[in-house]
Amino acid sequence: MSGNRRRFFQDAAFFSAGFFGLTEASRSNPNPQASDPKTARAIEQGRHHSPYGDHKKKEAPVSTGPDPYLRMATPDLPDLPHEMVGAIKVFNLIAEPVKRKIAPFKTIDSWGYNGSCPGPTIQVQQGERVRIIFENRLPESTSIHWHGLEVPIEQDGVPWISQKPIAPGEKYTYEFTVHQEGTFFYHSHGAMQEMMGMIGFFVAHPERSYKPHADHDFGVILQEWAILPNNTVPNTSAMEYNWLTFNGVSAPAITPMIARLGSRVRLRIINMGMDHHPIHLHGNQFVLTGTEGGRAPESTWYPMNTVLVGVAQARVVEFDAKYPGSWMVHCHLPHHMMNNMMDLLRDRAIETANTTDAKALSQMETLAKSVPFEHVHHSPIAENANSVPGFPQDAFMEMGMDDAVEKPETHGLPPNWSAGMMGMMTLVRVLPDKEYDEMMHRIKNLSTLEQKEHHHES
Ligand SMILES: [Cu+2]
């Protein structure tokens, strides 16, 4: 079946679900990446089929409601579900300790929300009234601050200033109307709790669609962690960091973002840490279309390919995916493009002098046997490497772990792709129609499988 023909049937299937089904399905899709951009474009442009048909000559009622919107996808993080109580969007948010696997061999004791660190993504639309029923399951008091949102002072979430701290075991209800659009976040207003991971996206989609529309919308939370070797608890008073994550995962375990060739990609990045991160995109230019304050006027856009995301800031960039390939998105601070090798030392016998390549490799295999690391020097080294001052730097340390981090989104990457990816680093994979459609099927099949497994368990 040709790509066009297949897409026609996919679209037909979407549209046959009807106007209400289409909008609701897109809003509750547990894997937003799997939604088809063509459908998403139709949604964002309001070109969905009306239940009254599309006969323009008939007196079509003029829509006064908000435009349908494309949901943001947050790789490796869930969305926070909601229920409607009358016209109010109600969320249940629970602060609690979370075990987070940030790399195949490294699980940390962080704090987050609803079993996730960073917390699950909250998505609302400009104009909506939201109620967040918050519960504190931490061993100490906390509160939630709505970063960037213009809310009444009693909703601002600052202990002792705007409210009493929420004690362990207590519930507290926040409620406000979101009159802004943009990329916001929620976080604990305790500095140490922030560094334990207590942050999440709060995205307010615009009442009237952004122009031009985007076909893909991705969100990334930047975090940094100071964790001593063989420890699991982040040192929240540290000033230096050895683990750097996107959405709570370090490369190469970060799930690549998948975009269709010819589409427009929106990327929202927020930063909750102690450092500013210059986030660089390979092979493409983008424009800065928004900040933590909302959408920027088009007259302010100019081309760039590195955006500095300061602490407590949001930066929204957009680009046209014109070139097929796996394009890197990464922080450009050298130390943020690494993981901590110390964790791999553990019970290894260390020899420091006169070691040979073979001896060095055997040294590295203690822990590696429990993780499918590949200790082969794919990047060749010279015969006399050990006599050159400065050796080793990069190539010696490259360790592929393709199998350990395999998932549908990594399908088709070249062998040993994971060896060059560490720290704050991921890929935007721009795929031509055929490959894109195949990838979406692969992702969808896996999520269906997971849902079935989950159903059997419960
Ligand atoms: Cu950085």
Image: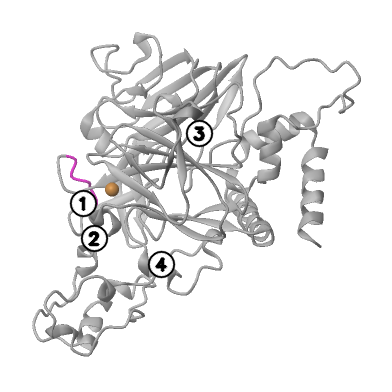
The residue identified by callout 3 is 80
Q: What secondary structure is marked by label 4? A: helix
Q: Earlier in the sequence, mark 2 or mark 3?
A: 3
User: Pointers 2 and 4 in contact (CB under 8 A)?
Assistant: no
Q: Looking at the image, which is closer to me, 171 or 277?
A: 277
Q: Which mark is residue 434?
A: none
Marks 1 and 2 in Cβ contact (< 8 Å): yes
Which residue is identified by label 2? 340
Mark 1 and mark 2: Cα distance apart in space: 9 Å
Q: Which residue is mark 4?
A: 418
Q: SS class of the residue under badge 3?
A: loop
Distance Cα–Cα, label 1 vs label 3: 28 Å
- CA–CA distance in space, label 4 to label 1: 23 Å
Q: Is residue 4 magenta?
A: no
Which of the 4 image quarters holds residue 391? bottom left
Between discs 4 and 1, the one toward the N terminus: 1
- Tell me where the magenta segment starts and ends, as one range: 232-236
Q: Which residue is mark 1?
A: 227
Classify residue 62 by image quadrant: top right
Q: Position of residue 173 (x, y in %)?
A: 42, 16
Tag 2: amino acid: Asn
Q: Position of residue 68 (x, y in %)?
A: 66, 28
